[in-house]
Amino acid sequence: MDTMTPDTQRPFTQALDRLRGVGLRPTRQRLALAKLLFEGGNRHVTAEILHAEAQSAEIRVSLATVYNTLHQFTTTGLLREIVVDSQRSYFDTNISDHHHFFYEASGKLDDIPGDQVVLSAMPSPPPGTKVKRVDVIVRIES
Amino acid sequence: MDTMTPDTQRPFTQALDRLRGVGLRPTRQRLALAKLLFEGGNRHVTAEILHAEAQSAEIRVSLATVYNTLHQFTTTGLLREIVVDSQRSYFDTNISDHHHFFYEASGKLDDIPGDQVVLSAMPSPPPGTKVKRVDVIVRIES
DNA sequence: GTGATTGCAAATCTTTTGCACTAAA
DNA sequence: TTTAGTGCAAAAGATTTGCAATCAC
């Protein structure tokens, strides 16, 4: 690997590696969407938003493919789905342990680093079940 | 008030008082839905479920009215909306401070009493904003 | 080549809306 | 009365699906 080239100059390679890492065939659409998603820090997107960004970037990709891709990325662990609004799905490029502020007025999300929320007491789940995740959502008045 | 009559035998009165308490006109539909919702402990319902229950109980009420009513009850503080699934809205008859287990496989919710979850550290919201609520959702593997 | 992926349009599902009709006060 | 509430059917918005065309390997 060319260690002299800054990350920001190898988005294609990064996206390619990411897709390969999870066994998804690197198609033109998936590469372009991965590039949009994973360049430039943590992002919270809806299918609609990502599709619009793709259009702006002259990337021809259908909304159906955007949905498919977001779900494939989520299933393979590249993204995480955040449920804060019963009307729309949000996807988060930050897959580390963390929580969220949700601004109801604007529909915007902000990450809360995992270490800023401490759950010092937690009920045990019913016997035989497994906790997939604990989500803490701080809702900001709309 | 007739203090000799057990609560379970005065559902109508209870529902009526509840509606009056929040200033909603006690129509036949609202009374019947309030009865279904608030009799028999804490419940988590979707519009679809409540509508089906009404049908079974021979209560003629349209789905549109069920939606209207659920939202009116939520706005007036009789119900609380729980967001766990980006495809469907759940309403909770328990309006006290508490959290939820969500069983992804079945779509069922269980209450976690407020005192069983202790958030010993919390980030401050951005200056000038106000926290409406903190939701803790323990997702049980589907 | 051949099996995976994509695009499109249609379908689906939940929720909302417009508006004439009905009922509570 | 008079004004709020209801039902219906249509509309809207998000997401999924079926299938032929296209692409990656």
Image (cartoon, coloured by chain):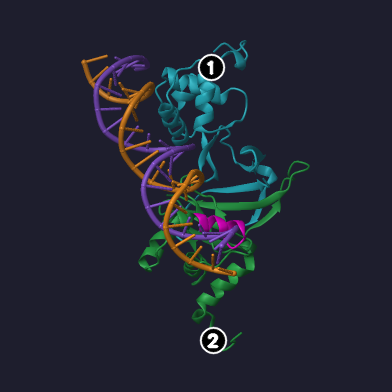
Chain colours: A green, B cyan, C purple, D orange
Q: Is residue C23 left or right of residue B81?
A: left
Q: Give the residue furthest to the right.
A: A127
Residue flagged by tag 2: what amino acid is it? Thr
Q: Say above or below: A103 vs B20.
A: below
Q: Could you tell me what secondary structure mostly forms the magenta stretch? A: helix
Residue lying at 54% horizontally and 80% vertically, measured from the top left: A7
Residue lying at 51% horizontally and 75% vertically, measured from the top left: A12
Q: What numbered label is drawn on residue A5?
A: 2
Q: Chain of mark 2?
A: A
- Image location of residue B120, percent across then percent down: 66, 55
Q: Nearer the viewer, residue A16 or A84?
A: A16
Q: Residues at marks 1 and 2, common chain?
A: no
Q: CA distance from mark 1 to mark 2?
A: 69 Å
Q: Tag 2: Cα neighbours inside 10 Å, few (<14), some, or many (≥20)? A: few
Q: Chain of mark 1?
A: B
Can residue B120 be seen from the camera position used here?
Answer: yes
- Image location of residue B12, percent across then percent down: 52, 16
Q: Is residue B27 magenta?
A: no
Q: Say above or below: B36 vs A141.
A: above
Q: Secondary structure at mark 1?
A: loop
Q: Is residue B128 left or right of residue B6?
A: left
User: What segment carries the magenta color?
Assistant: A68-79
Q: Nearer the viewer, residue A44 or A18?
A: A18
- The N terminus of chain A lies in which quarter of the figure? bottom right
Q: What numbered label is drawn on residue B57?
A: 1
Q: Secondary structure at mark 2?
A: loop
